[in-house]
């Protein structure tokens, strides 16, 4: 069900369940970032997808000689490994 449209982006509403510890960590990180819990969760999910894709893409480019591999390695700090409150699954 689409409930709103922000900058031509449909927004879905759904419910999630998480353990108490994960909830507290996520809430702290959302507050630290100055975001609502839903905005922080959306950002964390997006960052997780980007991190998960960066390695295989860089490996494919390394095999084909494309420059993405060099860029990905130079910018590896932009895609930190999963950690508490950082979108880890």
Image (cartoon, rainbow, N blue to C red):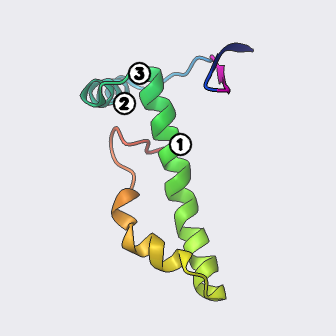
Q: Residue at x 24, y 29 (%)?
A: 32
Q: Quadrant of the N terminus?
A: top right
Callout 3 secondary element? helix
According to the picture, the residue beneath numbered tag 2 turns out to be 22
Q: CA distance from mark 1 to mark 3?
A: 14 Å
Q: Is residue 45 above or below residue 17?
A: below
Label 2 sits on a secondary structure element that is helix
Secondary structure under tag 1 reads helix
Residue name at image x 46 percent, y 79 percent: 70
Q: Position of residue 61 (x, y in %)?
A: 61, 79
Residues in magenta, as a range: 8-13
- Residue 5 is inside the magenta segment: no
For label 3, the crowd category at 10 Å Cα-Cα, with few meaning under 14, some 14 to 19 and many 20 or more, is some
Which mark is on residue 46?
Answer: 1
**Label annotation for residue 37:** 3
Mark 2 or 3, closer to the camera? 3
Gap in Å between the C-alphas at discs 2 and 1? 18 Å
Q: Is residue 88 visible?
A: yes
């Amino acid at each position: 069900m689409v409930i709103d449209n922000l900058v031509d982006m449909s927004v879905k509403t759904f419910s999630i369940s998480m353990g108490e510890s994960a909830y507290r960590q996520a809430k702290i990180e959302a507050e630290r970032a100055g975001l609502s819990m839903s905005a922080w969760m959306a950002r964390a999910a997006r960052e997780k997808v980007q991190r998960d894709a960066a390695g295989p893409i860089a490996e494919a480019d390394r095999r084909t000689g494309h420059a993405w591999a060099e860029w990905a390695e130079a910018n590896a700090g932009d895609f930190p490994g999963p950690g508490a409150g950082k979108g880890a699954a």
